[in-house]
Image (cartoon, rainbow, N blue to C red):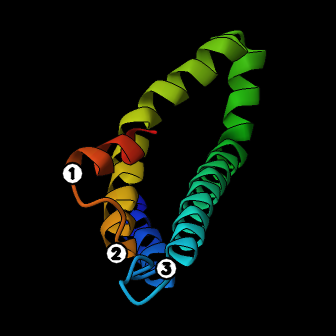
Amino acid sequence: VKLLSAVYLGLIVGLAFINSSSANKSVDEQLRNKSGAIAFSIIVALMSGAIAVLNVFYSEKQVFVREFQSRYYNTFAYYWSRYTVDLPIDFIRGFLTAVIMYYLIGLNPPFSSCLFLALI
């Protein structure tokens, strides 16, 4: 589901700003379109990550409180374990979204530039 949502977000952002660098637009307009697309993609990435975290913590709240009160582990251990478990899939999800929207928007063609944006 997370990977499908990444593809969906990449397509939505990419199609909203598709071909922002077409030759019949002025350089100033191309620059505004591209910077708007990048800013929007960053906002989408942050919000989708925040919503995912909120959903996970809300669904696991009762289990965490019960196990914390039983002193099975402390708060730091819980958050660190959640972070390390979710990190690989979140990295793949963000990378997939960035690659899809990057080429639909028509940003700098070399893959190294796409990789740089995806890593950020």
Task: Give the x, y percent position of residue 60.
Answer: 65, 41
Instruction: Kindly identify which residue carries mark 3.
Output: 17
Residue at screen point 40% across, 47% down? 117
Foreground pick, 75 / 70: 75
Residue at screen point 50% across, 81% down? 26
Please tell me which of labels 1 and 3 falls first in the chain.
3
Residue type, label 2: Leu
Q: Is mark 3 on a helix, strand or loop?
A: loop
Q: How crowded is mark 2: few (under 14 residues within 10 Å), some or many (20 or more)?
A: some
Quarter of the image holding residue 48? bottom right
Instruction: Kindly identify which residue carries mark 2.
Output: 104
Please tell me which of labels 1 and 2 falls first in the chain.
2
Residue type, label 1: Phe
Residue type, label 3: Phe
Q: Marks 1 and 3, Cα distance to the nearest angstrom?
A: 19 Å
Please tell me which of labels 2 and 3 falls first in the chain.
3
Instruction: Kindly identify which residue carries mark 1.
Output: 111
Task: Give the x, y percent position of residue 107.
Answer: 36, 64
Task: Give the x, y percent position of residue 111.
Answer: 21, 51
Residue at screen point 34% across, 75% down? 104
